[in-house]
Amino acid sequence: MEALFIYLIKSSGLIVLFYLAYFLMLRKETFFKSNRWFLLAGLITSVLLPFVFITKIIWVEPAATPINWSNVSMTNYTEEKTFEDYLPMLTALAYGIGMLLLLTKFAFDFYSLNTVLKGKSIQQQADFKFIDTNENVAPFSYFNTIVYNSALYTASELENILEHEKVHSEQNHTIDVLISRLFCIVFWFNPFIWLYKKAMLQNLEFIADNEATKKISDKKAYQITLLKITTHENCVAITNPFYQSLIKKRIVMLNKNQSKKWNSWKYALVLPVLVAFVFLFQIKTIAQEKTNENVSKSVPDVVTTINKNFSDEELKKKAEFFKKEFNCDLVFSEIERNSSNEITGITVNYNGNLYGNGTYKQHSNSTIKDIYIKHEGGKINISDAEIDPKIKNDKITSLSDKTLSIDKEIFINGEKVSQKDLDALNPDEIATMDVNKNKDKQEIRIITNKHAKTFNENEIYINGQKVTQNELNLLDQNTIDKMDVNKKEKTIRIVTKTRTQTFNDKDIPTPPVPPKFPDGPIPNLPEIDMSKMPTPPVHPANANNKKAIIQFKKEMKEFEAKMEAFEPDSSAHEKAIEDEMAKRAAIFEKQMDEYQDAMERYRESAVKK
């Protein structure tokens, strides 16, 4: 559940980012088609980018001493539930109820649409299906179906309306409408998604108006049709209705000069912010212990013995053991045997990228002496020199009965055991095994599969913060105060003495903070009085009143002249915004260069750590 909330928060943040980019830089440009793809790309990116992670591996020195769990106080307990414990469940419940209500509304809208379309006569023309209805609804399109009431409009008005709806149909604008509705259902808690949906629908109307007027000879008549349709308030949801509550904006955009092509650089401004999002929130840091830099620290010393009675199968098992444990190839050749099948001669070749290569030969008139193959300090040594006769030839005892004169202590799952207990342990049950030298004693610490599974199956928290298994392994044992295991919730909670996590590796450097795009006041657009827009004759009472129509056209002409007079002020305002944004972009680009240099230094220092 926590992962879902984090995902929704990240996606919501990206939705806000794309909406602000559109609102501040693109909504007044006439790149209508490009704006459509920008807004759709914003939704797709907000869904997919939170799944993209960059994995960063930090190599750390192996822990000097693994945690001895036998020395850590451990209690089983069940926490008393508080309001904070129920808060995630309540939040999930509220989110689910919101989605359910909106899905119900979505289904109802489909039902309403089906009611309008059901049983109607369809007229097929080319790729379009036309339905002439008697219902008092605003004209709309749904995929390739266009619905209208021809009784409410003149022939020229109907032509304008159909050209507009054909653009919606040809360019599949219904898909955009459905996508925006689905995003509103999933991200209903984010107020910006509703503004985002509104921006998408407005831009679709701008596209349809722009394309329709290219095919219509009388642009003014088209604008008059827009005003006339405002008298119809019945619209079907999930469709592209000809009527929208943005008639003034549509008329302004119809009379707006085409934006300069070089203004398209604004689309690229969102890319640095997306890069910053990835570096801030989408980097997974994985700590791994160094294994090859100093083999003697990570690979234990092992001695194995070969004698005259070894069969070919036993020699094969020895070779497999060294290959598995040390990635070292042992090859036994030129094997000679007497009548009793005892080895009288043998050649041993070894080759490993960490150990170099070499050859050992022993041939005798009787039988061979015992051969000792020893891995020590990252090197392979083969000889027939007499070594401690207690040495045995299996994985466990070769680690515990090495030729060491110092005392040793053996721990299995944190509990001290005897040599007898170690000999009785099944090698297949071993998950991890560490050999450490502490002063005058040697420690052998073994974790069995069953014990390791306990930690793998539970969520681990240190001082209330969830950590990974690697982070647990790096915890300094001496800082642990207590550890509580909650079997019901499958959690392990560790509290340290200082309430701060102490790890055996050096402090990981803090990554640099990416720059923010410079903000500040934007030049205000000179106000234009839209309140005096002419009101068309009320339909249908005055539709045939020629005097009223002539008066309306006269007033409309005066209004258009007023709009044209406003154009220089609007162009000057756009130029002021472009200059301001260009200055900010230059500052931001310089800051991004500095940030990238800082990130490069950070990555280099992180690798060194």
Image: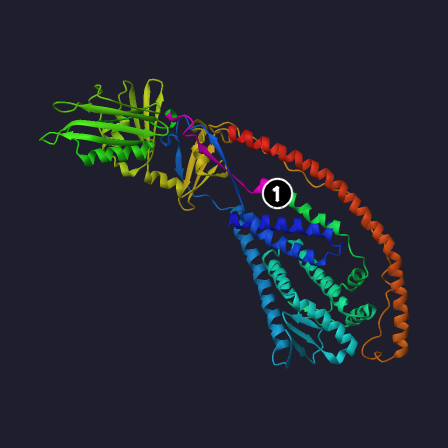
Tell me where residue 92 sits by quadrant: bottom right
- Which of the two residues, 388 or 100, is positioned nearer the viewer here? 388
Rendered residue at 85%/61% (across/down)? 530
- Which of the two residues, 304 or 119, is positioned nearer the viewer here? 304
Please tell me how crowded label 1 is: few (under 14), some (14-19), or many (20+) other residues with Cα within 10 Å.
few
- Where residue 575 sits in the image (x, y, percent)? 82, 48
- Residue reaching furthest front? 334
Q: Is residue 229 left or right of residue 591?
A: right
- Where residue 588 sits in the image (x, y, percent)? 70, 39
Q: Is residue 417 visible?
A: no
Q: Is residue 39 visible?
A: yes
Q: Amino acid at mark 1?
A: Val
Residue 468 lies, with reference to residue 104, above or below; the image says: above
Q: Is residue 346 left or right of residue 479?
A: left
Residue 449 lies, with reference to residue 609, above or below; the image says: below
- Where residue 106 sits in the image (x, y, percent)? 60, 66
Residue 54 lies, with reference to residue 408, above or below; the image says: below
Q: Secondary structure at mark 1?
A: helix
The colour scheme used to paint the residues is rainbow
Residue 531 lies, with reference to residue 153, above or below; the image says: above
Q: Which residue is mark 1?
A: 275
- Where residue 201 sits in the image (x, y, percent)? 69, 62
- Residue reaching furthest left? 339
Bounds of the magenta span? 278-295
Asked whether residue 395 is drawn in magenta, I would say no
Rendered residue at 79%/44% (across/down)? 579
Tell me where residue 560 sits by quadrant: bottom right
How many labels sit on residues? 1
- Which of the two residues, 158 or 179, is positioned nearer the viewer here? 158
